[in-house]
Amino acid sequence: MDDQHDIAALAALIDRARRAVIFTGAGISTESGIPDFRSPGGVWTKMAPIEFQDFLASEHARRETWRRRFAMEDTFASAAPNRGHRAVAELIRRGPASAVITQNIDGLHQASGVPEEQVIELHGNTTYAHCLDCSTRYEIAELRAAFEADQKPPRCRRCHGFVKTATISFGQAMPEAAMQRAEAETMAADLFLVLGSSLVVYPAAGFPELAKRNGARLAIVNRERTGLDRMADLVLHRAIGETLGAAVGVD
Ligand SMILES: [Zn+2]
């Protein structure tokens, strides 16, 4: 009975919305088998993340960055969108959602059918790499084969610049264009739907606060309590796929 009530409440908020923005964090991707690096016991509590300045300054740091990335490749390459991703894609396709703002770097929203231009990646994307100097794109599989042969962190074929996954590292500036688009989408929305983020990582966590201050409704679906539960119009401490899937009518 509680389940039905929760799902009906979420469906009602979605039905009333004229324009929604969806904000996703690690919790939606853990349901696809991608670990949450920041969670207790996650990778970053065991291994310190490598700062961007160190990546630039040290061959050793670049090699270690790439070693860790390739160690994760089988997980990333085999991860597929889950029911939560499919429900998000459906809300984009038929409305009322205009965009997905995501803290995730796995490309699963695009893989589920959300058009590239409607995904706003605040932390970049780890499913491909690029040259930090000339932006030439490189594919992970090709870089991995070369690395496994010579253990050298990749350099750009064109300009010899450093090649790095297209993610935003610790110590790297937030991507300005993505931040501006996220803010514009937030200000235009009358429903802000958070899925699988504990809303503790700023500046990303500032968007739901901004939405709420701007008069939007705020709904949060997250396994654990979040920093903004008290401010939200609806909080469901539940799994995302089964909850949003049922609310949207997607399997
Ligand atoms: Zn280059």
Image (cartoon, helix red, strand yellow):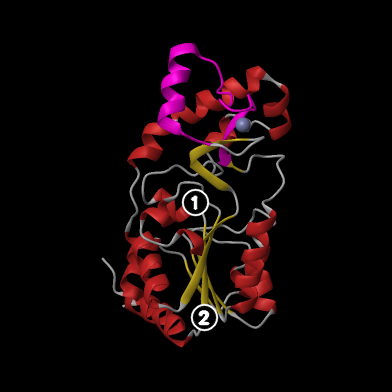
Callout 1 environment at 10 Å: few (<14), some (14 to 19), or many (20+)?
many
Label 2 amino acid? Arg
Residue 90: x and y, percent?
36, 70
**As drawn, 134 above or below 211:** above
**As drawn, 66 above or below 82:** above
The answer, for residue 131, to whether it is visible in the render is yes
Residue 73: x and y, percent?
41, 32
Residue position for label 1:
26
Query: Where the N terminus falls, by quadrant?
Result: bottom left
Label 1 amino acid? Ala
Q: Is residue 141 magenta?
A: yes
Q: Nearer the viewer, mark 2 or mark 1?
A: 2
The answer, for residue 195, to whether it is visible in the render is no
Between marks 2 and 1, how big is the CA–CA gap?
Answer: 24 Å
**As drawn, 55 above or below 181:** above
**On the image, which quarter does residue 8 sit in?**
bottom left
Q: Nearer the viewer, residue 213 or 85?
A: 85
Highlighted magenta segment, given as a residue range: 137-166
| Badge 2 residue CB within 8 Å of ligand 1 | no
Callout 2 environment at 10 Å: few (<14), some (14 to 19), or many (20+)?
some
Q: Secondary structure at mark 2?
A: loop
Residue position for label 2:
19
Q: Residue at x 38, y 60 (%)?
A: 85
Residue 34: x and y, percent?
42, 43
Residue 172: x and y, percent?
70, 41
